[in-house]
Image (spheres, helix red, strand yellow):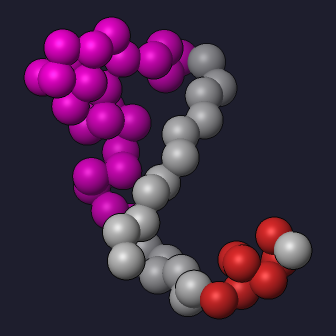
């Protein structure tokens, strides 16, 4: 089922500065949250709004 869901939406390939870990950490700090340790592996979830 997951394969069907992933195939429905085309993915745009490219570099997006907003997805840079350093920028994401900056946004966390601005929002009052502790950023994740990016010196080790970490995972984030990209949410799309339709």
- Whether 35 is among the magenta residues is yes
Question: Which image quadrant is residue 20 in?
Answer: top left
| Residue shown at the point (71%, 86%) measured from the top left | 7
Where is residue 42 shown, x and y percent of the image? 60, 28
**Residue lying at the far right of the rendered structure:** 1
Residue 32 appears in which quarter of the rendering? top left
Read off the magenta span.
Answer: 15-39
Horizontal side of residue 4 vs 11, given as left or right: right
The answer to whether any part of residue 26 appears in the image is no
At horizontal 20% and vertical 31% (from top left) the residue drawn is 27
Residue 25 is one of the magenta-drawn residues = yes
Q: Would you place residue 46 above or below residue 27 in this image?
A: below
- Left or right, 9 with respect to 31, comes to right
- Front residue of 24/6: it is 6
Q: Which residue is located at x 53 percent, y 39 percent?
A: 44
Q: Can residue 1 be seen in this view?
A: yes
Number of numbered tags placed on the structure image? 0
**Which quarter of the image is occupied by the N terminus?**
bottom right
**Where residue 41 sits in the image (x, y, percent)?**
64, 26
Compare residues 29 and 17 and report the one nearer the observer.
Answer: 29
| Image quadrant occupied by the C terminus | bottom left
Position in image of residue 38 (x %, y %) = 49, 22
Query: Above or below — where is 9 with respect to 16?
Result: below
Residue 30 horizontal side relative to residue 22, left or right: left
The residue located at (42%, 74%) in the rendering is 14
């Amino acid at each position: 089922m997951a394969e069907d869901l992933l195939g429905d939406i085309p993915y745009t390939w490219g570099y997006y500065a907003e997805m840079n870990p350093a920028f994401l950490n900056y946004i966390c700090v601005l929002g009052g949250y502790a950023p994740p340790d990016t010196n080790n592996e970490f995972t984030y979830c990209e949410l799309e709004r339709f």
